Image (tube, rainbow, N blue to C red):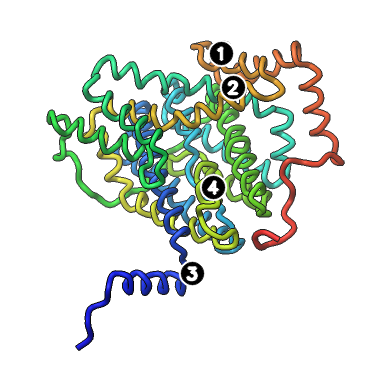
């Protein structure tokens, strides 16, 4: 009879099996970290969107199911084909924008705006002019508009803390402690969610009777196309998807030595966005935050980092299977806690947007875009997000004319080197 394996021998066998399967420990850890971000960073924001738009359980389930499913399938296919960590997921910036602006419109109007946004993204991809459009509508102004639109989410943390300090204070403290600790095994949002749930459960604010698994459902919603929703939602959503997701996400891959299929990736995002919208979902996006984890040095050798995205995709599929269960969390967890957690989840995006807005060549235009977007301005029936883009451009044209004209000349000149180069090889780095 054989003696039992020692701990060291067991670990060696495990490493051998991982190596033979093509999985490296670094691939697994990066994939799990990215997957945890999808769950702990994304779900609180999504629940706040569902609450703000007053979605039905079936609408909530359908939205989460379709956005996670299209992202998982397309991201997995691109990663395996090109051997690059090409993560495609739901557009979290789009979620936040819809939560702040969307309540002004009916759900069919939101579906119509999402369809138009998907068509615009697809058109930009087919024409291959996404980067040129972003030069004509400079990223600092876009990020200023985005920061102004979501800043109320951040301040919402302290609005809720003033109402329920014992419920909101602990997860905020846990978030800050975990962020200060800087441990890969302790994601700040995971710490905030766990501590927040404990803070809600101890005084009996968690109603577990409302939590039950049921099969996820897909529902079709007839769209309604209104000019106001198209201008206030579709235009900013499509610009953010191309500017925040594609330009920054694909640019990050290029900075790591990859040659991503830029045009194809944009087309896939556009197709996904149209499919998502048909079933009540919002835009797909290149997962900028996900790629930051999956393409990092900690994710393993460059040529094997795509495997980390395969692992992360399993978490998206987990959300697909539990889409209906996630929608029932609104009946289990206090809304104030959901709002606070959503605010914590967008802090990194808000900080990044603020930095990119005011540290570029068009700080004054970006600042005006931020201020207008943060205001309750409505003019001609159109809200502040659209006018923020207009105000930012006009301000830069007046006070930062030379810098803005230089950006536009760069867009018109085909001989100028672009920040994102077309792919020259199907495989990963040369």
Residue at 26% x, 32% y is 196
- The reply to whether dot 3 and dot 2 touch (C-beta < 8 Å) is no
- The reply to whether dot 4 and dot 3 touch (C-beta < 8 Å) is no
C-alpha separation, residue under disc 1 versus residue under disc 4: 30 Å
Along the polypeptide, which appears first: circle 1 or circle 4? Answer: 4
Q: Nearer the viewer, mark 4 or mark 2?
A: 4
Q: Where's the N terminus, which quadrant? A: bottom left
Q: Nearer the viewer, mark 1 or mark 4?
A: 4
Q: Residues within 10 Å of mark 1 (few under 14, many from 20)?
A: some
Give the residue at mark 1. Answer: 371
C-alpha separation, residue under disc 3 versus residue under disc 1: 50 Å
Give the residue at mark 3. Answer: 22
Along the polypeptide, which appears first: circle 3 or circle 1? Answer: 3
C-alpha separation, residue under disc 1 versus residue under disc 2: 8 Å
Element assignment for label 3: loop
Tell me how many marks there are: 4
Give the residue at mark 2. Answer: 144
Along the polypeptide, which appears first: circle 4 or circle 3? Answer: 3
Along the polypeptide, which appears first: circle 4 or circle 2? Answer: 2
Q: Where's the C terminus, which quadrant? A: bottom right
Is 63 placed above or below 134 here?
A: below
Give the residue at mark 4. Answer: 291
Residue at 33% x, 46% y is 323
Residue toward you, 334 or 61: 334
Element assignment for label 1: helix
Residue 242 in view in this figure: yes
Q: Give the label on residue 176, or none.
A: none
C-alpha separation, residue under disc 4 versus residue under disc 3: 20 Å
């Amino acid at each position: 009879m054989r003696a039992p394996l020692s701990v060291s021998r067991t670990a060696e066998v495990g490493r051998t099996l991982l190596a033979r399967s093509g999985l490296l420990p670094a691939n697994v850890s990066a994939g799990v970290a990215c997957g945890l971000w999808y769950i702990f960073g994304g779900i609180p924001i999504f629940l706040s969107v569902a609450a703000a738009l007053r979605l039905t359980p079936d609408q909530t389930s359908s939205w989460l199911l379709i956005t996670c499913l299209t992202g998982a399938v397309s991201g997995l296919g691109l990663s395996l084909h090109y051997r690059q960590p090409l993560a495609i997921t739901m557009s979290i910036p789009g979620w936040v924008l819809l939560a702040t602006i969307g309540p002004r419109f009916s759900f069919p109007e939101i579906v119509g705006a999402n369809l138009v946004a998907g068509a615009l993204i697809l058109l930009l991809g087919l024409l291959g002019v996404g980067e040129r459009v972003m030069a004509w509508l400079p990223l600092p102004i876009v990020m200023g508009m985005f920061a102004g639109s979501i800043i109320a989410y951040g301040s919402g943390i302290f609005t809720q803390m003033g109402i329920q300090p014992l419920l909101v204070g602990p997860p905020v403290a846990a978030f800050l402690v975990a962020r200060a600790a800087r441990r890969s095994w302790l994601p700040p949002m995971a710490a905030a969610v766990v501590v927040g749930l404990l803070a809600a459960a101890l005084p009996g604010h968690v109603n577990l009777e409302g939590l039950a698994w049921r099969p996820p459902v897909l529902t079709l919603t007839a769209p309604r196309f209104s000019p106001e929703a198209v201008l206030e939602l579709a235009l900013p959503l499509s610009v953010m998807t191309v500017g925040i997701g594609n330009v920054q996400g694909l640019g990050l891959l290029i900075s790591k030595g990859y040659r991503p299929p830029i045009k194809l990736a944009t087309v896939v995002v556009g197709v996904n966005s149209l499919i998502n919208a048909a079933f009540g979902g919002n835009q797909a996006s290149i997962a900028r935050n996900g790629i930051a984890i999956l393409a990092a040095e900690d994710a393993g050798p460059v040529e094997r980092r795509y495997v980390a995205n395969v692992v992360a995709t399993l978490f998206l599929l987990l959300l697909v299977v539990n889409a209906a269960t996630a929608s029932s969390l609104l009946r289990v967890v206090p809304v104030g806690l959901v709002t606070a957690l959503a605010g914590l989840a967008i802090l990194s995006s808000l900080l990044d947007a603020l930095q990119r807005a005011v540290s570029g060549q068009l700080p004054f235009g970006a600042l005006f875009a931020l201020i207008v977007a943060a205001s309750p301005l409505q003019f001609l029936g159109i809200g502040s997000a659209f006018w923020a883009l207009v105000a930012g451009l006009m301000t830069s044209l007046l006070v930062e004319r030379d810098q803005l004209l230089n950006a536009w000349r760069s867009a018109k000149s085909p001989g100028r080197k672009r920040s994102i180069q077309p792919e020259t090889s199907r495989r990963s780095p040369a």
